[in-house]
C-alpha cells in the first residue's frame, strides 16, 4: 500500500478521534499547553460536543471509522492492564453492527462462490439479513431438515481491511521508531497480531473448521452447544450452519427469565472454558456475550469461531498451577509460576 494512502487514512482516523474528544480530551485540558487547549476546544466545537467517559467516546469514534477500527477496539478491550478497567469496559461494549448490504449483493456473493445455478439450488429460500456486523451478515434459510444460518462476507471487505491495516502498521512502526517508551508495549507486534486475526476472519472456511473442532470438544465436555456446519454450503466467503433458536446474552433481561439459574450458568461457562483449554488445549478466543445464545432448554450455545486459541502442554500445566494456587491461596507459588513461565 502507498505511503500517501496510509497517511491519508491515518489523518482521517486522527481527525475523527480528535473530534470525538479522544486525542485532546477535555478531562486533561488543564494539563495541556495553551495551543493544544485551543485546538482541543475547536475540535470539540465542530465535533458536536462529544459526551460520555473517555472510553465511551473512543468506542463511538471507532464505530464511526469502520470494521478494522471496531475490531481494533475489541482487541484493546482485552487489555485492562494497559488501558485501565473503565476504558476496557467501555470498549468491550463496542457494537459490531452496521447496516446490511442489499439482497442483490448477497445473491451475487453466493453465485460468485458456488456458481449461479448451484447457488440457486443450495440457497433457494434465503431470508432478508437478520444480523449485520462489520465483516459479514447473517441470513436465515428454512430447510426441510432444519433451518440454516448463512453467513456472507461483505463485498470488498478484504481490500478495505488491507488498506486500513496497512495504515495501522505504518502508524505502529512510526510510534515505535520515535518513542522509546512505547517499545515496552510492542506496538508493531501488537498490530501484527490483530492484523493476522482480522485477516483470518475473512476466510470463513477457517471459521467453519474451528466450529467443527470446538463442537467435537464441547460434545465431550458437555457444557456448550455448537451449531453443526453445513459443508456443502460453505466456502471462503460463505459459511452455513444449523440455525440455533434462542436469545443472545446481549438481549435486555435475558437472564431474568423464569427458571434461569444465573449461578449455574456462570459455573457452566467457567467450567466449559477451562475444560476445553486445560483438557484439550483449545478454546473459543472471542467468547463475549454477543457470541453466546441462551437456548430454550437453558443451555448456552456458542457461535462465531473466527478466532480459536490454542495452548500447549507446558502452558496448560502453568495455567493449572496458577488456578490451583488461587484455590489454595498460595500466592507465592502463583508468582513463582509466572516467573517460570516467562510471563514476568
Image (cartoon, rainbow, N blue to C red):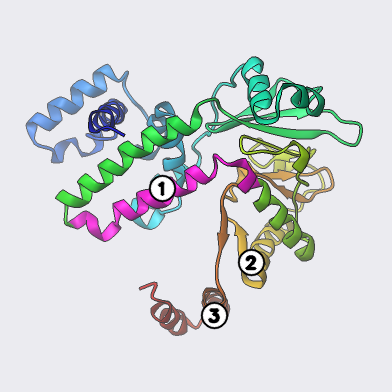
Which of the numbered marks, if any, corresponds to residue 204?
none
Q: Position of residue 79 (x, y in %)?
A: 41, 54
Is 182 inside the magenta-drawn segment? yes
Q: CA distance from mark 3 to mark 1?
A: 27 Å
What secondary structure predominates along the stretch shown in magenta? helix
Which of the numbered marks, if any, corresponds to residue 274?
2
Q: Identify the element where label 2 is drawn.
A: helix
Query: Along the horizontal axis of the image, is 277 left or right of 228?
Result: left
Q: Nearer the viewer, residue 165 or 257?
A: 165
Q: Identify the element where label 3 is drawn.
A: helix
Q: Position of residue 201 (x, y in %)?
A: 55, 43
Q: Identify the element where label 1 is drawn.
A: helix
Where is mark 1, residue-wise? 76
Q: Which tag, 3 or 1, sits closer to the chain's start? A: 1
Is any part of residue 57 visible from this angle?
Answer: no
Circles 2 and 1: CB atoms closer than 8 Å = no
Q: Nearer the viewer, residue 108 or 88?
A: 108
User: Residue at 53% of width from left, 78% of height from top?
Assistant: 314
Is 69 inside the magenta-drawn segment? no
Q: Position of residue 164 (x, y in %)?
A: 37, 34
Where is mark 3, residue-wise? 321
> What residue span does the magenta drawing correspond to?
181-207
Q: Farthest residue in the right direction?
A: 144
User: Residue at 21% of width from left, 39% of height from top?
Assistant: 28
Q: Which tag, 3 or 2, sits closer to the chain's start? A: 2
Q: Which tag, 2 or 1, sits closer to the chain's start? A: 1
Q: CA distance from mark 3 to mark 2?
A: 13 Å
Q: CA distance from mark 2 to mark 1?
A: 23 Å
Query: Along the horizontal axis of the image, is 138 left or right of 333?
Result: right
Q: Quadrant of residue 114?
A: top right
Q: Nearer the viewer, residue 305 or 204?
A: 204
Would you place residue 189 above or below residue 103 in this image?
Answer: below
Amino acid at each position: 500500500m502507498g505511503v500517501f494512502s496510509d497517511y491519508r487514512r491515518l489523518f482521517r482516523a486522527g481527525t475523527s478521534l480528535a473530534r470525538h474528544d479522544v486525542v485532546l480530551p477535555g478531562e486533561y485540558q488543564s494539563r495541556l499547553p495553551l495551543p493544544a487547549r485551543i485546538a482541543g476546544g475547536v475540535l470539540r466545537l465542530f465535533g458536536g460536543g462529544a459526551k460520555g467517559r473517555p472510553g465511551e467516546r473512543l468506542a463511538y469514534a471507532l464505530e464511526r471509522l469502520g470494521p478494522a477500527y471496531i475490531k481494533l477496539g475489541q482487541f484493546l478491550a482485552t487489555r485492562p492492564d494497559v488501558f485501565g478497567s473503565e476504558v476496557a469496559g467501555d470498549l468491550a461494549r463496542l457494537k459490531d453492527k452496521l447496516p446490511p448490504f442489499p439482497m442483490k449483493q448477497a445473491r451475487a456473493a453466493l453465485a460468485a462462490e458456488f456458481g449461479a445455478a448451484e447457488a440457486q439450488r443450495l440457497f433457494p429460500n434465503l431470508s432478508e439479513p437478520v444480523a449485520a456486523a462489520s465483516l459479514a451478515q447473517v441470513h436465515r434459510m428454512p430447510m426441510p431438515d432444519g433451518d440454516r444460518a448463512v453467513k456472507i462476507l461483505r463485498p470488498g471487505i478484504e481490500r478495505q481491511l488491507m488498506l486500513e491495516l496497512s495504515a495501522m502498521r505504518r502508524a505502529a512502526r512510526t510510534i515505535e521508531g520515535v518513542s522509546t517508551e512505547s517499545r515496552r508495549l510492542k506496538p508493531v507486534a501488537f498490530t501484527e497480531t490483530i492484523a493476522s486475526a482480522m485477516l483470518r476472519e475473512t476466510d470463513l472456511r477457517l471459521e467453519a473448521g474451528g466450529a467443527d473442532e470446538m463442537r467435537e470438544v464441547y460434545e465431550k465436555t458437555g457444557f456448550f452447544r455448537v451449531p453443526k456446519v453445513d459443508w456443502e454450503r460453505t466456502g471462503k466467503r460463505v459459511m452455513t450452519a444449523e440455525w440455533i433458536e434462542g436469545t443472545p446474552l446481549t438481549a435486555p433481561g435475558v437472564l431474568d427469565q423464569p427458571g434461569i439459574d444465573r449461578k449455574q450458568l456462570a459455573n457452566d461457562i467457567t467450567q466449559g472454558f477451562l475444560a476445553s483449554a486445560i483438557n484439550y488445549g483449545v478454546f473459543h478466543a472471542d467468547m463475549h456475550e454477543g457470541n453466546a445464545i441462551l437456548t430454550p432448554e437453558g443451555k448456552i450455545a456458542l457461535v462465531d469461531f473466527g478466532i480459536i486459541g490454542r495452548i500447549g502442554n507446558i502452558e496448560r500445566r502453568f495455567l493449572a498451577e496458577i488456578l490451583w494456587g488461587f484455590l489454595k491461596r498460595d500466592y507465592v507459588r502463583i508468582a513463582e509460576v509466572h516467573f517460570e513461565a516467562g510471563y514476568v
